[in-house]
Image: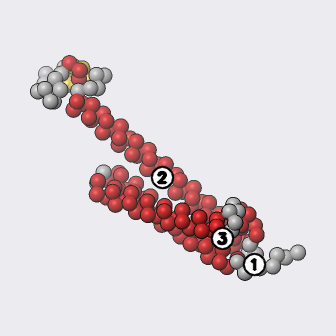
Amino acid sequence: MAQSPSPETPAILAALEEEAASLQALETALLAERDALTGRDPAAIEAAVADKATRLEQHSRLQAERLARCGGRPLGEIIDALHDQAAAAALRDRLLAQGERCEAINRDNGQLIRRQQDRAERALGILRATDSGLRLYAGDGSTERSGDRQSLGKA
């Protein structure tokens, strides 16, 4: 027996479309964050992080509104209850794919941040002469352990 259309169906589909648009905006912000991180421009990184936070907050708000409207039911149950199954299923698939892309980009950005932090820590170790395993070249081309040298502050 065919399911009768719910008066909520258009509103729920519109809300899901709005969530999809917010995920697209979040993905764009995450890509901008990645570009800023690889460019190592502090002002660009700060702006990108702020934009990402705004987009994430917007998406979280839309999800909370959907959950409140739909009695806390998971996305799959909401989709199954809608009249236009084909459109709803395509929308669900798009939401899931967008969410997965956002998670992957965010994970990659986190790895970029960790690598840059590691590089900065190593550079600070050189400046502080605390990286005792590091070999530096002397003026005559020989190597010496960094712990054998005076720190920049003592020189």
- Tag 3 residue: 69
Type of amino acid under label 2: Asn
| Mark seen at residue 6 | 1
The residue shown at (69%, 73%) is 87
Q: Is residue 40 above or below residue 143?
A: below
Q: Residues within 10 Å of mark 2 (few under 14, many from 20)?
A: some
Which type of secondary structure does the marked residue at label 1 adopt? loop
Q: Amino acid at mark 1?
A: Ser
The image quarter containing residue 34 is bottom left
SS of the residue at dot 2?
helix
Report how far apart the C-alphas of labels 2 and 1 lie in the structure: 37 Å
Q: Amino acid at mark 3?
A: Arg
Q: Quadrant of the N terminus?
A: bottom right
Q: Do the residues under discs 2 and 1 have CB atoms within 8 angstroms?
A: no
Residue 133: x, y in percent?
31, 22
| Residue located beneath label 2 in the image | 106
Q: Residues within 10 Å of mark 3 (few under 14, many from 20)?
A: some
Label 3 vs label 1: CA separation? 14 Å
- Corner quadrant of residue 144: top left
Image position, residue 69 (x, y; %): 66, 70
Looking at the image, is mark 3 or mark 1 earlier in the sequence? 1
Please say if 67 is above or below 41: below
Q: Nearer the viewer, mark 3 or mark 2?
A: 3
Q: Is residue 20 visible?
A: no
